[in-house]
Image (cartoon, rainbow, N blue to C red):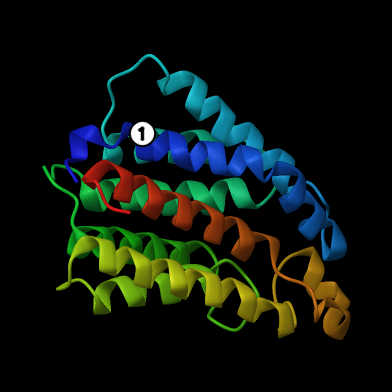
């Protein structure tokens, strides 16, 4: 995908968050504050409104998104997602095209910088459980056609999200519940899956994939 033609992908990501606002808050409300959908919707809606009339590329847009999420939405997830998207933007900056290897570089950069902010690891019932396997699957498939690599990323993201249901939360408000946090999906892992899948679908549309 041409980096300069990535705006529709960004808008698809925003639309996916907007469409799942109530669901994300419902998931979050089971073991958390219940405001995850509201906060994420606010950030992505602000972003979509601000780039609506602008010719903006994929990585530049991710940078704008990261800044908005970091500084303008409440809760802990704003800085977390802000860090991820800003780091992805930096890793992809200057690239004319976004292929599987480039996107893997970007996701890995987001994961790496997130590790400087929070100590969460795979198995701690956080969005890391979605992001880490998605990045790994993309890297493993980076020599394959982009459509195939994106399908692998989506499958890994979905499996990662689903894996959080049987985990005990180690971070955030839900960590206070101990064993009672088991049996519920993590809201961050869920929103991360929604965003990554929308990103993949948007890129497929841009390159003419199914």
Left or right placement of residue 17 versus residue 94 in this view? right
Above or below: residue 3 compared with residue 193 = above
Asked whether residue 120 appears in the rendered view, the answer is no
Mark 1: give few (<14), some (14-19) or many (20+) Cα within 10 Å: some
The number of callouts visible is: 1
Left or right placement of residue 111 versus residue 89 in this view? right
Front one among 21 and 62: 21
Asked whether residue 134 appears in the rendered view, the answer is yes
Left or right placement of residue 59 versus residue 53 in this view? left
**Tag 1's secondary structure?**
helix
Above or below: residue 76 compared with residue 135 = above
Q: Residue furthest front?
A: 210
Residue 46 position within the rendered picture, expressed as x and y whole percent measured from the top left: 56, 26
Which image quadrant for residue 118?
bottom right
Residue 127 position within the rendered picture, expressed as x and y whole percent measured from the top left: 57, 66
**Circle 1 is placed at which residue position?**
8
What residue do we see at 54% from left, 76% from top? 160
Quarter of the image where the C terminus is located: bottom left
Residue 181 position within the rendered picture, expressed as x and y whole percent measured from the top left: 82, 77
What residue do we see at 80% from left, 81% from top? 182
Residue 163 position within the rendered picture, expressed as x and y whole percent measured from the top left: 62, 81
What residue do we see at 30% from left, 71% from top? 138
Left or right placement of residue 29 versus residue 73 in this view? right
Above or below: residue 103 compared with residue 123 = above
């Amino acid at each position: 995908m041409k980096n300069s033609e990535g705006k529709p992908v960004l808008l698809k990501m925003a639309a996916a968050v907007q469409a799942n606002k109530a669901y994300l808050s419902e998931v979050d409300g089971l073991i958390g504050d219940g405001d995850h959908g509201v906060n994420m919707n606010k950030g992505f809606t602000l972003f979509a409104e601000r780039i609506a009339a602008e010719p903006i590329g994929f990585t530049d847009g991710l940078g704008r998104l990261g800044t908005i999420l970091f500084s303008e939405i409440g809760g802990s997830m704003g800085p977390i997602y802000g860090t991820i998207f800003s780091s992805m933007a930096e890793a992809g900056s200057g690239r004319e095209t976004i292929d599987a290897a480039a996107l893997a570089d970007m996701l890995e950069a987001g994961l790496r910088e997130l590790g400087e902010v929070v100590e969460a690891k795979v198995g701690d019932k956080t969005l890391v459980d979605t992001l880490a396997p998605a990045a790994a699957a993309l890297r493993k498939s980076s020599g394959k056609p982009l459509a195939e690599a994106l399908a692998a990323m989506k499958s890994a993201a979905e499996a990662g999200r689903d894996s959080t249901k049987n985990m005990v939360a180690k971070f955030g408000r839900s960590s206070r519940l101990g064993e009672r946090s088991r049996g519920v999906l993590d809201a961050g892992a869920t929103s991360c899956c929604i965003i990554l899948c929308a990103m993949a679908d948007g890129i497929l549309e841009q390159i003419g994939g199914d």
